[in-house]
Image (spheres, rainbow, N blue to C red):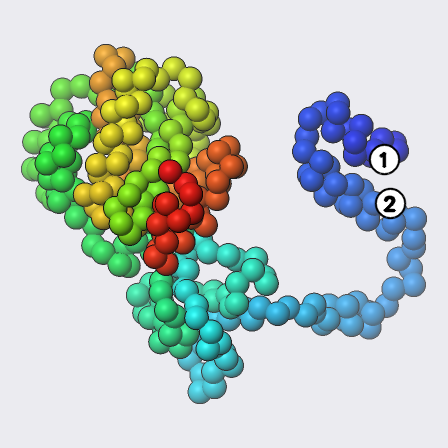
Amino acid sequence: MKNDINVDEIHELSFVDKWFLTQHKELVDAEQYLMARSLSHLTKDGFREVKKHEFEANTPHMYSSYDSECESAPTKRKKVLILGGGPNHYDTSDCLDFEPSTEEDVLNVIELERPDGIIVQFGGQTPLKLVLPIQQGRFNAILKELNIEQPKGGIAKSEADALAIAAAIDKYLSDAVEIDVDALADSHNNVVIGGVMEHIEQAGVHSGDSACILPSQTISSSCLTTIRSWTKKLAKSLNVCGLMNCQYTITVDVEVFLLEANPCASRMVPFVSKAIGHALAQYAALFMSGKSLNEILFT
């Protein structure tokens, strides 16, 4: 760019998206602008004046404090509180609160804002734990009722339990393929699969550190049928409304096992949404407000 090569030409040579190249071009232009000028005329007063100026924002950014005055002015419009990974860019939401995801802090915001609903699906595990206690034993029982296979394991509450469980596990799932599934369910118990992704790295590598492909390339049609069937059965049994993520593994013996399931948005949702051309997070919010799969024509 410093050699007067334009964004279009760099894009043709590198295939880097023009959006990113444009951002770099702005940085290069800013650097050249500053390099062409002297800083000798700047004064301390000038620096102070610049540092105290702010830009106008329509969205208030709030944090709580133990004071007698509350500067927040909640809107009386219908509104929904999104915990965790909601819109955190200024002017995307009506109000942005910077608070820890603890019961006390969340309840303080709820008491002030009085939202019509609360969405906990977009913030990962932490908001989910505020709503319901984790009942691993009950989940295992549900899988057994639905005839969904899971790897050998157990729940240990003591050292003796852990040693007994370890002695009962005679093998690990080595050289297995891991599968991520993002599904959507409406309040009428209708379920649709958003995407089935195949991990590049073998099972055991954390999904956040593993690349994936959509659609899957090496998974047999019979395994895909099993995965889709189990995902839908589980979503209906758990009465999921919105998003659900399931992680499976397929062994070298072509056995399918469910590793875990979470009734929330996974880190893959933006990727899946862009790949299939459907805004899954938006659909999930619509389902939680009462819309159905048929109404948004996504089946």
Residue 266, disc: none
Say which residue label 1 marks. Answer: 2
Specify the quadrant of the image occupied by residue 215.
top left
Residue, x 59% and y 61% (percent of image)?
90
Q: Secondary structure at mark 1?
A: loop
Q: Is residue 19 left or right of residue 248?
A: right
Percent x, y of residue 51: 73, 68
User: Can residue 187 be seen in this snapshot?
Assistant: yes
Disc 1 marks a residue whose amino acid type is: Lys
* Vertical order, 86 against 31 (above or below): below
* Vertical order, 237 against 290 (above or below): above
Give the position of the C terminus as an image quadrant: top left
Residue 32, disc: 2
Name the residue nearer the viewer: 121 or 3: 121
Percent x, y of residue 184: 35, 42
User: Can residue 154 be seen in this snapshot?
Assistant: no
Percent x, y of residue 104: 32, 69
Instruction: Verify CB contact (< 8 Å) between mark 1 and mark 2.
Output: yes
- For label 1, count other residues whose C-alpha is less than 10 Å away and answer few (under 14), some (14-19) or many (20+): few
Residue, x 51% and y 68% (percent of image)?
95
Measured in 3D between alpha carbons, the distance from the residue under mark 1 to the one under mark 2, in whole angstroms, is 9 Å
Q: Secondary structure at mark 2?
A: helix
Specify the quadrant of the image occupied by residue 52.
bottom right
Percent x, y of residue 271: 49, 36
Disc 2 marks a residue whose amino acid type is: Gln
Residue, x 7% and y 31% (percent of image)?
164
Give the position of the N terminus as an image quadrant: top right
- For label 2, count other residues whose C-alpha is less than 10 Å away and answer few (under 14), some (14-19) or many (20+): few
Q: If you read the primary sequence from the N terminus, does the residue marked by circle 1 or circle 2 appear first?
A: 1
